[in-house]
Amino acid sequence: MDLVNPFIGTSGKRDADYGGMIPSTAPPFAMTRWSPMTRQNYVSRTPYHYDDKKIGGFIGTHQPAIWMGDSGYVTGMPGIGTVKTAADDRALPFSHADEQAAADRYSVRMRAGSGRTLKTEMTGTSRVGLLRTTYPADTDTNFVLQATRSGITGKVHVDPAAREITGYNPDRQDSKLGPFKASNFKGYFVARFDTAFDSHGTATGAKLHEGQNERTAGDLSAYVRFPSGTRTVQVRIATSFISLEQARANLAAEAPDDQSFERTAAKTRAQEPHGAAGGGAHRRDRHSECGTANASPAKRTTSLHHHGPEPEMRIPRPGGTRPCRTRPHGDQRALRALWTLRAIFQHTPTAP
């Protein structure tokens, strides 16, 4: 487990060099994986590249592979000073020296100007992402939650009493790859904060709609500001392809109010493949299939970690009826073999 290096496969100047990996955190076969976002992802492009210099958010992604698109994603980003909702405006520079990634958590210190830093830590369950941000002292603090991008109409709702932002994103990028448009598809989210809101609003692109609780539009975000003196804020973002009610149920089941960030990360760590536990035994067999058994321990362990980015799980139906099972796109055996080979042959990035 300690040998996993999620940065393997995230760099490369040419398409032939790029492994298409992201330093995401989530248990194996999670519905949603959480990753820093240095670029906008779509079919043939993932949300993180090691050579990028800024982070514009932390995305809950359902993109199963670089050659597939994302669907129903949601992105959060902390900020200080004036609220900035457009992706390019809110992006902050960072250094790999201030970035750490493991299978169960990710953390980064972003430079916010005038010697100030924003530290964000992230972990995740199968359907819930946890972001904990430490803000600099003596500054105005805020958080932006982006539901949709340009051309995609979604919905956000801010509930100050519940300390929540809820909504949906109907984008399904891989509809371009086939005839099935899934016109009723939505990715729902419930973001619950541990800190009260001082003020809030919605936004379309860079335009703020101060004090507005709800909006349905394209390029849509919601934002909240926190009271003066706020230093640390934790938000739990639950996801569902069924409904807002199901997202709330996922939040209660996987990351309840009384479960700490550290406890959640520990539970995620316990599900990762290592040794004979966590499914590691049958996954080790795949190394002989792919010809990777003689790779270095770090690359071999990382390839096990990369075997699990696609969702393949049982999800509860509303009303407690028999669970349904999600399946990954395409031939999962071939996809995982390719991920293994990418992790093995892609060089490990070296921080400057």
Image (cartoon, rainbow, N blue to C red):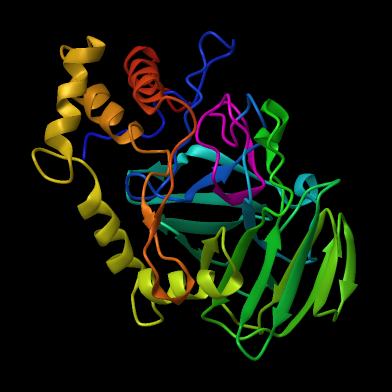
Question: How far from the left and from the top, in percent, is residue 71?
Answer: 63, 45
Between 330 and 351, which is closer to the camera in this rendering? 330
Q: Residue at x 66, y 84 (%)?
A: 227
Whether residue 40 appears in this view of the structure is no
Q: Residue at x 52, y 17 (%)?
A: 18
Q: On the image, which quarter does residue 291 sit in? A: top left
Q: Residue at x 47, y 29 (%)?
A: 21
Q: Which residue appears farthest toward the bottom when viewing the image?
A: 161
Relative side of 93 to 217, left or right: left
Relative side of 339 to 35, left or right: left
249 to 283, vertically: above or below: below
Q: Which residue appears farthest toward the left when viewing the image?
A: 276
Between 340 and 48, which is closer to the camera in this rendering? 340
Q: Is residue 67 magenta?
A: yes
261 to 6, vertically: above or below: below
Magenta stretch, main secondary structure class: loop
Q: Quadrant of the N terminus?
A: top left
148 to 341, vertically: above or below: below
Whether residue 182 appears in this view of the structure is yes
Question: How far from the left and from the top, in percent, is residue 344?
Answer: 31, 16
Please provide the residue range marked out in magenta.
46-69
Q: On the image, which quarter does residue 173 sit in? A: top right
Question: How far from the left and from the top, in percent, is residue 295?
Answer: 21, 14
Between 126 and 314, which is closer to the camera in this rendering? 314
Q: Is residue 223 magenta?
A: no
Question: How far from the left and from the top, in percent, is residue 347?
Answer: 39, 15
